Amino acid sequence: MKTILDEIKWNEAGLVPAIAQQHDSGKVLMVAWMNREALAATLAEGRAVYYSRSRKKLWRKGEQSGHVQKLKELRLDCDSDAVLIQVEQVGGIACHTGRHTCFYRCAEGGAWREVEPVVKDPAEIYRPQSP
């Protein structure tokens, strides 16, 4: 029996791009990658779980910062090769730079200009864990 995971067109690395969107405002927060395990965990846990290509492992959004993304709705695009995750962004910060969205730079006059404020200093968010 086919599952919803079987209907996704995973890329050659077994990944699919995942766009995280604030469910009530429609603001795009970030883009990440998911493998089958991450997407299954997202559905099972009701929170965003992504696959880190650099660390080659799952990462639960907010596991260090506390800025969890609670799953509100999951959508699949018309080509079945991208997912849209509508979330409630806990704490209002999705970006590791301390901003609400990872898309905080705007092209203007041939240069990138920062147009979103830092909500919280990343040094305060990502303090080293005590042993």
Image: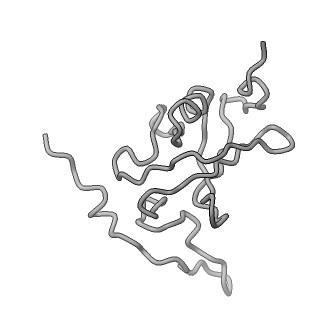
In front of the other: 33 or 72 = 72
In front of the other: 107 or 45 = 45
Q: Is residue 24 above or below residue 81?
A: below
In front of the other: 126 or 3 = 3
Q: Is residue 18 left or right of residue 62?
A: right
- Residue found at x 49% / y 67%: 100
Quarter of the figure that contains the N terminus: top right
Q: Is residue 44 above or below residue 28?
A: above
Residue at the extreme left of the image, as rendered? 131
Quadrant hosting residue 38: top right
* Spot occupied by residue 43 in the image (x, y as percentages of width and height): 59, 33
* Spot occupied by residue 12 in the image (x, y as percentages of width and height): 72, 29
Q: Is residue 48 left or right of residue 20?
A: left
Residue at the extreme bottom of the image, as rendered? 109
In front of the other: 90 or 112 = 90
* Spot occupied by residue 49 in the image (x, y as percentages of width and height): 52, 38
Residue at the extreme right of the image, as rendered? 78
- Residue found at x 54% / y 55%: 88
* Spot occupied by residue 61 in the image (x, y as percentages of width and height): 46, 46
Quadrant hosting residue 27: bottom right
- Residue found at x 50% / y 33%: 45
Colour setting: one colour
Q: Is residue 86 left or right of residue 54?
A: right
Q: Is residue 106 above or below residue 80?
A: below
